[in-house]
Image (spheres, coloured by chain):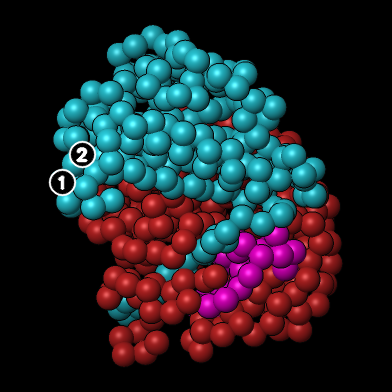
Amino acid sequence: MLSVLDLTAGRIVATITIGGRPAGIAMSSDGTRAYITSPDGHKLSVVDTVSRTVLRQVALPGGPLGVAVSPDGKRVYVADWYGSQVVVVDPVTGTVLSTIGVGHSPSGLAVTPDGRLLVCADRLDNAVSLVDLETLRATAAIAVGEHPFGVTIDAAGATAYTADVESDDVSVIDLASRRLLARIQVGKRPYVVALAGNRGFVTNEQGGSLTAFDLASLHPVGTVAVGNMPEGIEAADDGRTLYVANWMDDTVSVVDALLLTVTATLPAGDSPRAFGTFLRSTRQGSR
Amino acid sequence: MRMICCLLACMLGAQAAFGHGSDRLKVTETVVVPADPETVWAVVGDFHDLNWDPAVANTAGDGGNVVDSFRTVTLKAGGAITEQLVIYDAEKMTYSTFLPHNDPAVLPVTNFSTILQLRPAASGGTEVEWRAAGFRGYPNDNPPASLNDDVAVKAMHDYLRAGLDELRRRFGISHGF
């Protein structure tokens, strides 16, 4: 199931049947499409977020989990968690355009804002692959912490952040020089990073918290207690509000990124994962 | 002029366990007993003492309920698990544990974690909620029958239920439940 929460009203306004234990999500840049992976159902679902309907489902090999979409919305990239490949899907026709070899158990994916580079967390290799999206080939592998899961790229397309589950840290990668800049010690079993203002925030799945770190100094600046077993996290356009899916509690925590406080806890569906980008902007009066 | 309001798409896991996959699984069990929360917490609130649990042969730990400390729980059924304390809040009467490494032969669950939470029950007495989460014992696709999702859910359910049933025996059945 996919739950749609109206964040102004603070409640679930729709649920959409997906099937196959959905886990990953990528929102198109215009917010009109959501791409949902179901590792158990071996498929990618294309959702029209305006009509709240499933437009099509694409059967994919292995365990499709991490998902990202190109800025122009023409390609969707899906990582095969059980294998070592990223599948490129045309979301309009539902055809598989290409398959890209990466490291073992690719997990989180992120695309730079210019659409030219894909960063893939190769979980079992303790590395990220950089994939050139013109040639559709992996061009580099960079060692990070142990078992990187989520990948996040900043708005400038300059820096990538991985949450390294087994080593309890966040790896910071300079994409131009292809260098690991730092590993920031965070809480237990970090899951994925979000960026808000001049801070990064990582969900610590064990301990029910976020660790906030300064993007300039790359040092932790505080923690925020959220719900139990937080997974997906994303910052809103205001650069100040974070939304966190608490898998264990079936809730969403709303967090003030400046004050490091939880401002609201909203009901979510059963076991929200929200692994990827899940926020959609709407204009007042529109749906 | 964006961001007047926004929508959150939020994933839902499966309601029931079925045969395959490597999704994290969770189980919640509760009991209401006719004793006040302080009395119940005095029995169950020490991370290093799980000896109230009938499934447990003994618990070895450093004491003190300090986050990051470990306890080794020897199970009557055989084997032991070494769990880490990840949250401890005596005021809220809750603590959470995590099992970083596990032999699936002892407990057919990986990344096993638990949350114990006491609350005053609406009808008086105490509601004891004990929750567990984890992945099945076999991490890849197509698990053997002995290490699939159903087996993991049943193991977590039975583990929680044995402890809570013991509290019911110890404190009695709450009126109205």
Q: In the rendered image of this protein, which colour is used for chain A?
A: red
Q: Secondary structure at mark 2?
A: loop
Q: Position of residue A85 (x, y in %)?
A: 80, 54
Which chain does the numbered disc 2 sit on? B
Residue under label 2: B34
Side (left or right) of A141 relative to B130: right
Q: Position of residue A242 (x, y in %)?
A: 35, 57
Chain drawn cyan in the picture: B
The residue drawn where x is 57% and y is 65% is A25
For residue A19: magenta? yes
Are the two marked residues, 1 and 2, in contact with CB atoms closer than 8 angstroms? yes
Residue under label 1: B124
The residue drawn where x is 19% and y is 28% is B39
The residue drawn where x is 77% and y is 44% is B145
Q: Is B4 above or below relative to A157?
A: below
Give the quarter of the figure containing the C terminus of chain A.
Answer: bottom left
Task: Tell me the amino acid under the disc marked 1.
Answer: Gly
Q: Position of residue B120 (x, y in %)?
A: 19, 44
Q: Position of residue A93 (x, y in %)?
A: 76, 84
Task: Tell me the amino acid under the disc marked 2.
Answer: Pro
Stretch of the chain drawn in magenta: A16-43
Q: Is A128 above or below relative to B96?
A: below
Which chain does the numbered disc 1 sit on? B
Q: Is residue B171 or residue B31 the one in the foreground? A: B171
- Sequence-first tag of 1 and 2: 2
